Image (tube, coloured by chain):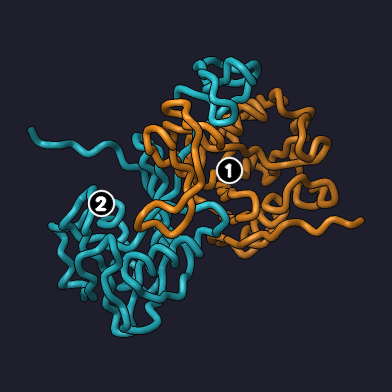
Chain colours: A cyan, B orange
Amino acid sequence: MKFCPACGAPVVLRKPQDDHRERYICTACAAIHYQNPRMIVGTIPEWQDGRILLCLRAIEPRRGLWTLPAGFMENDETTWQGAARETLEEANARVQVHELFGLYNMAYINQVHLLFRATLLDLDFSPGVESVEVKLFGEEEIPWEQLAFRPVRHTLENYFADRKRGQFTLHSGDLAPPVRSA
Amino acid sequence: MKFCPACGAPVVLRKPQDDHRERYICTACAAIHYQNPRMIVGTIPEWQDGRILLCLRAIEPRRGLWTLPAGFMENDETTWQGAARETLEEANARVQVHELFGLYNMAYINQVHLLFRATLLDLDFSPGVESVEVKLFGEEEIPWEQLAFRPVRHTLENYFADRKRGQFTLHSGDLAPPVRSA
């Protein structure tokens, strides 16, 4: 941020009184502009035979890899509404959203990922604009080596383990920046 | 938002291609400025005798009412770190943060409240700048009629009920705008 979104004057990075960190403050109107983490909301859409709906990404990041339907939560919606909306946008799939299942912090990119259990309501799904392909996978068919994001992998692993023991509980964790090979 | 935070030119509210809602778009550099909900993170700090730490608010909103320590999650931290930081700031209290206990959507103000169970580590607490008083309350001492926010009330009710039955589970809900008497 270089300019004040309210009045257009330059901002400076400075610690306001009684605050513990620097904020962007307008040099003209003195408005303080806070910046906060964003939520990624999505679902684990399960069909009645136990298969899970995954989307093959048509866009970066991680184009050509499989993911659970998820995306940035928007203003004016709840986490459940956001998760259902993303499922509709990415897979043209209608779901009933249940309880939160996965909470993953990715502090290095200022994101919190919230994945919800969900029941897929019908088989009338198809790729949305951000997907190349949308497909149901049984546990033994999951493309583990072609998953797009680590929260997706953790969530699917925990989901199948919990389903096996007959009880779903919330799983959470912190993810550090991925280590990339040179 | 009236001006582009990147280049200072005026923005317009317009739907980008392939998007489903209007965004602030810069008329000069074409940057799209997304606006997303914020997270409020906090704790339910329990001392070893079962009492819960509450803070009497020194500031608006809800000045003079009691609350669990909580506040806006910041960039560069996890939900747990944010919850612990808020507890330290508002009550000068050190806690060990456990699992997520309450998730409340307040879509009408673009907030998601995340309240975590926590163990209070010592009795060396005192009011932070946003608190007038900080005090431990047994279940029968909770000032139910002087609680600051609805997520605090719901969280405390669920917490005591769960503790009684010996098992904590995640509680979540959506809160509509409060009805105010004329």
Residue B158 position by quadrant: bottom right
Residue at point 61% right, 62% down?
Answer: B173
Neighbourhood count class around disc 1 (C-alpha, 10 Å): few under 14, some 14–19, many 20 upward: many
Q: How far across and how far down the image is residue B11, in percent? A: 49, 37
Quadrant containing the C terminus of chain A in the rendered view: top left
Which residue is found at the position 50% from the left and 42% from the top?
A: B12
- The N terminus of chain A lies in which quarter of the figure? top left
Name the residue at the right extreme. B182
* Mark pair 1, 2: CA separation: 25 Å
* Residue A149, numbered label: 2
- Residue drawn 25% across the image and 51% down it: A149
Mark 2: amino acid: Phe
**Dot 1: what SS?**
strand
Residue that lies at the very extreme toward the left in this rendered image: A182
The answer to whether residue A58 is above or below residue A22 is below
Crowd band around label 2 with a 10 angstrom C-alpha radius: few (<14), some (14–19), many (20+): some
The chain ID associated with circle 2 is A
> Disc 1 marks which amino acid?
Ile
Q: Is residue B121 left or right of residue A106?
A: right
Q: Which residue corresponds to mark 1? A: B40
Q: Nearer the viewer, residue A156 or A3?
A: A3
Residue A173 at x, y percent in the picture:
37, 47
A173 up-or-down from A30: above or below: below
Q: Is residue A21 visible?
A: no
Question: For this view, does B28 lie left or right of residue B36?
Answer: left
Q: Nearer the viewer, residue A44 or B176?
A: B176
Q: Residue at x 56, y 37 (%)?
A: B1
How far from the left and from the top, in percent, is residue B47? 64, 40
Against A20, residue A50 (above or below) is: below
Q: Is residue B182 visible?
A: yes
Determine whether, in the image, residue B5 is placed left or right of residue B47.
left
